[in-house]
Image (cartoon, rainbow, N blue to C red):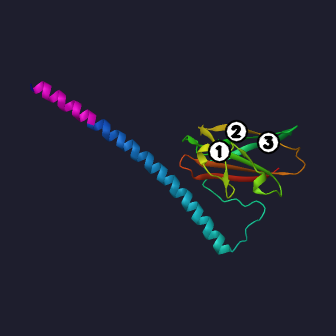
């Protein structure tokens, strides 16, 4: 009976240890998520303080907020053939030791046009120039890099320069990358 009692006690202790291990893993993930949000908020606060101290006027053409460098883009190419516009770029994980996941949107519009004429990939309604639902963006999970390609059907040929805006959201819906380029 002592043997069975000890065996049952070990099983109970093992189950308790497994539960505690899961709770610890969950707490570590929540702490990492909170640290990431704190870094985003600190970067935002620093940017706002610098703007207030310098009294800098905003650039009316291409304003860009700064974010902690979690991801970056490279090899941005824009090609249009007939009535199809293709925008391709590579999204790069700048934190090489930690995989990054989230959602990406590519917005394009002719320079000087209003928000009603904006092309959005993937298609999603906008509110104040930003997608209403970040989860409708193209999902990505990257260890190092991933190539993103967006295609748009045009109603007329392009004769003017384009303004391309790339928005990257993390899994919680925070903007972690925002870049606007004129091509």
Q: Residue at x 23, y 35 (%)?
A: 13
Tag 2: Cα neighbours inside 10 Å, few (<14), some, or many (≥20)?
some
Which of the 4 image quadrants contains residue 2? top left
**Which stretch did the figure color magenta?**
2-15
Residue 157: x and y in percent read: 89, 44
Residue 4 vs residue 73: left or right?
left
Q: Which residue is mark 1?
A: 104
The secondary structure that most of the magenta stretch takes on is helix
Q: Where's the N terminus, which quadrant? A: top left
Q: Are marks 2 and 1 in contact (CB under 8 Å)?
A: yes
Residue 74: x and y in percent read: 73, 44
Sooner in the amino-acid sequence: mark 2 or mark 1: 1
Sooner in the amino-acid sequence: mark 3 or mark 1: 3
Q: Which residue is mark 3?
A: 77
Tag 3: Cα neighbours inside 10 Å, few (<14), some, or many (≥20)?
few
Residue 10: say if magenta: yes
Depicted 88 relative to depicted 130: above or below: above
Q: Secondary structure at mark 1?
A: strand
Numbered mark located on residue 148 in the image: 2
């Amino acid at each position: 009976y002592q043997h069975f009692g000890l065996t049952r006690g070990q099983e109970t202790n093992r189950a308790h240890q497994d539960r505690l291990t899961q709770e610890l893993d969950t707490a570590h993930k929540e702490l990492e998520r909170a640290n990431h949000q704190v870094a985003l908020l600190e970067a935002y606060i620093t940017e706002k303080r610098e703007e207030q101290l310098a009294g800098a006027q905003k650039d009316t053409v291409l304003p860009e907020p700064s974010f902690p460098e979690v991801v970056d883009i490279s090899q941005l190419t824009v090609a249009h053939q007939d009535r199809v516009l293709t925008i391709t770029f590579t999204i790069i994980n700048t934190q090489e030791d930690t995989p990054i996941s989230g959602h990406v949107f590519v917005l394009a519009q002719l320079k000087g046009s209003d928000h009603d004429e904006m092309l959005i990939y993937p298609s999603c309604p906008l509110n104040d120039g930003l997608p209403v639902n970040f989860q409708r963006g193209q999902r990505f999970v990257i260890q190092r890099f991933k190539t993103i390609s967006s295609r748009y059907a045009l109603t007329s040929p392009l004769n003017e320069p384009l303004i391309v805006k790339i928005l990257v959201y993390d899994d919680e819906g925070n903007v972690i990358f925002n870049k606007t380029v004129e091509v």
